[in-house]
Image: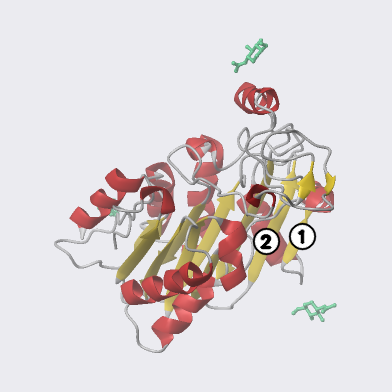
């Protein structure tokens, strides 16, 4: 298992599954923390919570994802990364309780650093599931969070070079001027003369543009999961990805297990892959087989997408499946 995971890292910089449980040998003893990408700062923070006498999976997930938000895990989680078309960093996050089936999420959260904790407040202090944009910011302020600028010199720099590079890449299609060579403002094109204006931009998920932490924590009694991300670099303002959508970016159920997604969220959210994985495991599939099937479902429609799923069942058995178009020959490591 360890060999396969390292292979996955080497061949496509994609994700790593880390178990810091006190497992000896190959058994994944509970409790267990797994997350997408080699964000060990998050894994360790979650492990510290779940390996203490009072720690719950929910607390572990919140602390784990918070550690990533603070450390800006590779610039793809938290403040100061992935500026949108106006140069602003906005955050998506979700937390899910596998016992109560309660969920709290924020989408396009602005000017607040602690996205996962705001998501938890949505879950605990409201009957709603998802709050978005400036109104989510207002909610966060009212529940005690500090409003601050999410820019850093780095994110300003990324934004400037994007403008200097004629706003390439971007997520527009079917518009004029040609979005593959020009900045906007765009308007709908009357006729589409090149393939470029019809095709989805291929969101290149690589070592410096992988886009989310998805974390699942299991103990003997229950399971919880969380996601946090600053979304896709150069996204159109207002874009919300799969991370804060239950069943898309993440899904957990204490009778079965959990799953989380990373990769091209715009495509993956069309399939609710995390939900599919958990439901496949409910029907008896192993985590590995369930993640494979869910990726195959997406691949049938979008052969060139980049993405991966991680899964764990309540016995602590782990599975992953990776599909990287950019590394076609090496990447179907599972
Ligand atoms: C978990 O906590 C126990 C008790 O505090 C400690 O002895 C053990 O080393 C910890 N395990 C890990 C893997 O950190
Ligand atoms: C919100 O949830 C509480 C607790 O479950 C319930 O009593 C209340 O009726 C709910 N309010 C609305 C408007 O659904
Ligand atoms: C950011 O850039 C400003 C202006 O160039 C500079 O004064 C400041 O020290 C930089 N901050 C960091 C953290 O690099």
Provide residue 111's location: percent of width, then percent of height: 75, 39
Left or right of residue 278: residue 153: right
Q: Which mark is residue 131?
A: 1
Which residue is painted at 58% across and 62% down in the image? 267
State the residue at coordinates (34%, 55%).
Answer: 17
- Depth order, front residue of 111/292: 292
Residue found at x 34% / y 83%? 285
Which quarter of the image is occupied by the N terminus? bottom left
Q: Is residue 232 above or below residue 256?
A: above
Q: Residue at label 2?
A: 105
Residue 205 visible? The answer is yes
Beta carbon at label 1 within 8 Å of ligand 2: no
- Above-or-below relation of 245 to 36: below
Drawn side of residue 208 relative to residue 178, left or right: left
Residue count near mark 1 (Cα–Cα under 10 Å), binned few <14, some 14–19, many ≥20: many
Give the percent coordinates (x, y) of residue 299: 47, 67
Mark 1 and mark 2 residues within 8 Å of each other at the beta carbon? yes
Residue 24: percent from the left, percent from the top? Answer: 16, 61
Identify the element where label 2 is drawn: strand
């Amino acid at each position: 298992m360890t060999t396969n995971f390292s292979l996955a890292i080497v061949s496509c910089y994609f994700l790593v599954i880390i178990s810091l449980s006190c497992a000896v040998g190959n058994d994944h003893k509970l409790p267990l923390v797994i997350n997408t990408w080699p964000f060990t700062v998050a894994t360790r923070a979650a492990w510290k919570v779940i390996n203490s006498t009072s720690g719950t999976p929910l607390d572990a997930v919140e602390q784990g994802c918070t550690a990533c938000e603070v450390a800006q895990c590779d610039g793809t989680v938290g403040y100061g990364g992935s500026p949108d078309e106006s140069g602003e960093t906005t955050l998506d996050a979700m937390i899910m309780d596998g016992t109560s089936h309660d969920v709290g999420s924020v989408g396009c959260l602005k000017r607040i650093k602690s996205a996962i904790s705001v998501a938890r407040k949505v879950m605990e202090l409201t009957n709603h599931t998802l709050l978005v944009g400036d109104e989510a910011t207002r909610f966060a302020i009212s529940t005690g969070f500090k409003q601050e600028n999410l820019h850093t010199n780095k994110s300003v720099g990324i934004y400037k070079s994007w403008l200097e590079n004629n706003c390439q890449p971007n997520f527009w299609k079917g518009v004029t001027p040609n979005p593959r060579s020009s900045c906007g403002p765009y308007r709908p094109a009357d006729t589409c003369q090149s393939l470029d204006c019809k095709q989805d931009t291929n969101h290149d998920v690589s070592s410096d543009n992988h886009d989310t932490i998805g974390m699942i924590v299991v103990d003997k009694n229950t399971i919880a999961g969380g996601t946090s991300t600053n979304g896709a670099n150069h996204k159109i303002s207002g874009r919300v990805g799969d991370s804060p959508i239950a069943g898309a970016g993440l899904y957990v159920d204490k009778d079965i297990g959990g799953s989380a997604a990373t990769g091209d969220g715009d495509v993956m959210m069309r399939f609710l892959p995390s939900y599919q994985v958990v439901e496949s495991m409910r029907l008896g599939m192993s985590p590995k087989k369930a993640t494979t099937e869910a990726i195959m479902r997406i691949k049938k429609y979008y052969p060139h997408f980049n993405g991966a799923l991680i899964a764990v069942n309540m016995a602590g058995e782990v599975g992953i499946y990776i599909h990287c178009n950019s590394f076609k020959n090496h990447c179907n490591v599972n």
